[in-house]
């Protein structure tokens, strides 16, 4: 009776013979059936059904081994030897990250061969990287597009460790007289980020657009901005590189138009105080643009390169800054896969709302000073607590503050800058900043300072910005971040939540007014 019933139910889709064989080979059949039903489930529900709310990210700050010579060309064997030495170290980091459960690891810009090349001396390090649309797992088909030992090794590291791997390397693309822009050596050379999924498949290739100064001696910028994204079960990712972060294309477009959840950001970032230190600026970008950022910096003390982090829109989740040692460092932390769905996400944010609706505070005597080559208007914080406004052109900055005790030998100013920065690149800024001066001499306000002793137990900074792209920075003594100690309100105020854990170096609203940038800064700054 029982057997008959079973048969009847099964008979809908199993004939007699299959039923018998099912009984004989039951265990194998059961597992066949369950994997088949999982397969059906995937087909029906799509990838979204397995979406993860959270994921684990890793970034590795790599102390890059540099080439002995970047002025004399080397053989491709010698080039590969150096790249393998760097990849040996990256391999250890990738294995360690995978062991800690990371879904993805990001490694730094120039992390495989370093920098300061000429076009000719860089050439042996380059590989011809195909468009990911070719659907290629280099680890399993190493010869499909000719020799590509770096791509193959990275792909195998991803599949062997079942982790997404992002690295930065060089791409070469032959060209000729049919292309009027073809460089005279008959090829384009690109600074390129590559991403492999956990099966080792090449899923993204991004050519850096905004090349930094001398980099233009050995790399070409693509003719058009490339908007590169890829989907995973733990969110949508977009990529750009280092100096790109200062500009509209492709960085802002990836967030505003392509709605990525996480930005992958390999960098070789030179720290510049007070506003452009890696951990400070990159965490502020995550907060101001309201996305996750995985920032992996090269580590090179002699060039002031340090500072990596895993940053969320509501603050840094993990960061690393080490100006003392020559060591690399792995960071691993958990993030929301889709931060825009988080209850703390600020969906409407107007950076000028508060500042344009209040009556300006009292204006105190003001003077000018220089911050990273830009001429600011400053006003000193002369009282222990107060409300102060300082303006430059169309930007007025308002500060309310209270110090617990001001050190005799320290001076703080409120500064405003509204103008085009024109030194290592051309970009229009609107900045409101509270900062500690270099000494008691007010001429030193804006110079780099790394230590402070004055404690603030309250600050609220706002500005009459003409842009809605503003990055909130808080940097504490010792070049440290202040997670959980401040917040951005939807009316554009940057306010302290508590007495900061360390004295303050700077509290800044760093605004980028993209409409005022010179057209196509990436082609204007070309020096070749
Ligand atoms: C010139 O370059 C184009 C595009 O890369 C290629 O299709 C063509 O074969 C090349 N022509 C010659 C003469 O090398
Ligand atoms: C990512 O997923 C979204 C929504 O599921 C889809 O619209 C988009 O085309 C996908 N993008 C890529 C690059 O696969
Ligand atoms: C590194 O930073 C220090 C302190 O700000 C500065 O004096 C030095 O010139 C910087 N070095 C480089 C290579 O930028
Ligand atoms: C922000 O608020 C100000 C003042 O109400 C308004 O003029 C401006 O258009 C708003 N900006 C945005 C981007 O909504
Ligand atoms: C600053 O202004 C606020 C109101 O905006 C006021 O409550 C506070 O007393 C003022 N602080 C000082 C020190 O003047
Ligand atoms: C600067 O100070 C002068 C008086 O010293 C004052 O008239 C002016 O309004 C102030 N300007 C700004 C931008 O604070």
Image (cartoon, rainbow, N blue to C red):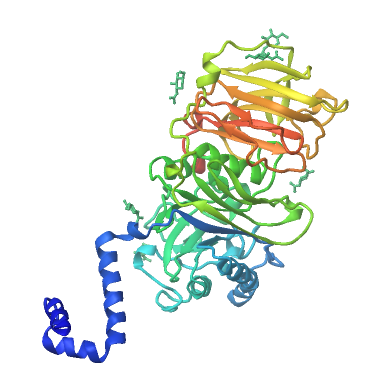
Q: Is residue 526 visible?
A: no
- Give residue 300's quadrant in the image: bottom right
Tell me which image quadrant ligand 5 sits in: top right
Relative to 510, residue 170 above or below = below
Q: Residue furthest front?
A: 1
- Give residue 462's quadrant in the image: top right
Relative to 368, residue 120 above or below = below
Q: Is residue 348 visible?
A: yes
Q: Residue furthest right?
A: 408
Q: Quick one: 105 or 122, which is closer to the camera? A: 105
Q: Quadrant of the N terminus?
A: bottom left
Q: Position of residue 278 (x, y in %)?
A: 65, 46
Q: Quick one: 43 or 90, which is closer to the camera? A: 43
Residue appearing at x 59%, y 47% in the figure: 212
Q: Position of residue 514 (x, y in %)?
A: 49, 32
The number of discs equals 0
Q: Position of residue 313 (x, y in %)?
A: 53, 42
Horizontal side of 464 relative to 322 (left or right) equals: left
Q: Quick one: 360 or 467, which is closer to the camera? A: 360
Residue appearing at x 85%, y 25% in the figure: 441
């Amino acid at each position: 009776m029982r057997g008959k019933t079973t048969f009847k139910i099964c008979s809908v889709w199993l004939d007699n013979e299959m039923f018998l064989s099912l009984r004989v080979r039951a265990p194998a059949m059961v597992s066949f059936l369950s994997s088949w039903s999982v397969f059906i489930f995937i087909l029906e529900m799509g990838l979204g059904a397995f979406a993860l709310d959270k994921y684990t990210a890793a970034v590795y700050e790599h102390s890059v081994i540099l080439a002995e010579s970047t002025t004399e060309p080397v053989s491709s064997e010698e080039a590969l030897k150096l790249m393998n030495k760097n990849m040996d170290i990256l391999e250890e980091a990738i294995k360690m990250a995978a062991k800690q459960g990371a879904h993805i690891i990001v490694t730094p810009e120039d992390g495989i061969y370093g920098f300061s090349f000429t076009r000719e001396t860089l050439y042996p390090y380059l590989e011809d990287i195909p468009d990911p649309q070719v659907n290629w797992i280099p680890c399993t088909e190493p010869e499909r597009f000719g020799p590509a030992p770096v791509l193959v090794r990275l792909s195998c590291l991803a599949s062997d460790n079942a982790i997404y791997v992002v690295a930065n390397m060089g791409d070469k693309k032959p060209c000729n007289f049919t292309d009027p822009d073809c460089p005279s050596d008959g090829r384009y050379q690109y600074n390129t980020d590559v991403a492999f999924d956990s099966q080792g498949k090449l899923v993204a290739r991004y050519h850096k657009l905004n090349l930094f100064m001398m980099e233009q001696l050995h790399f070409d910028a693509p003719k058009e901005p490339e908007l590169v994204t890829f989907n995973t079960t733990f969110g949508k990712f977009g990529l750009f590189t280092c100096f790109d972060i200062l500009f509209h294309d492709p960085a802002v477009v990836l967030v505003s138009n392509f709605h990525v959840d996480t930005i992958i950001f390999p960098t070789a970032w030179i720290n510049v105080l007070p506003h452009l230190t890696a951990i400070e600026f990159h965490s502020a970008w995550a907060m101001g643009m309201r996305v996750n950022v995985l920032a992996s910096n090269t580590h090179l003390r002699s060039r002031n390169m340090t500072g990596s982090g895993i940053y969320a829109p509501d603050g840094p989740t993990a960061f690393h800054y080490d100006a003392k040692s020559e060591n690399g460092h792995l960071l691993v932390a958990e993030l929301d896969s889709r931060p825009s769905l988080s209850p703390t996400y600020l969906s409407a944010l107007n950076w000028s709302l508060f500042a344009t609706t209040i009556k300006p505070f009292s204006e105190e005597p003001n003077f000018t000073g220089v911050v990273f080559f830009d001429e600011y208007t400053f006003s000193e914080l002369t009282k222990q607590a107060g409300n102060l406004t300082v303006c430059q052109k169309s930007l007025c900055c308002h500060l309310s503050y209270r110090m617990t005790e001001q050190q005799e030998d320290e001076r703080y100013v409120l500064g405003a800058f509204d103008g085009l920065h024109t030194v290592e690149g051309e970009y229009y800024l609107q900045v409101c900043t509270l900062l500690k001066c270099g000494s008691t001499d007010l001429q030193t306000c804006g110079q780099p300072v790394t230590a402070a002793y004055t404690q603030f137990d309250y600050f609220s900074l706002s500005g009459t910005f003409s842009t809605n792209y503003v990055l909130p920075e808080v940097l504490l003594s010792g070049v440290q971040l202040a997670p959980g100690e401040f917040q951005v309100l939807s009316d554009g105020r940057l306010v302290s939540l508590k007495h900061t854990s360390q004295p303050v170096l700077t509290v800044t609203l760093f605004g980028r007014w993209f409409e005022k940038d010179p057209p196509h800064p990436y082609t204007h700054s070309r020096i070749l």
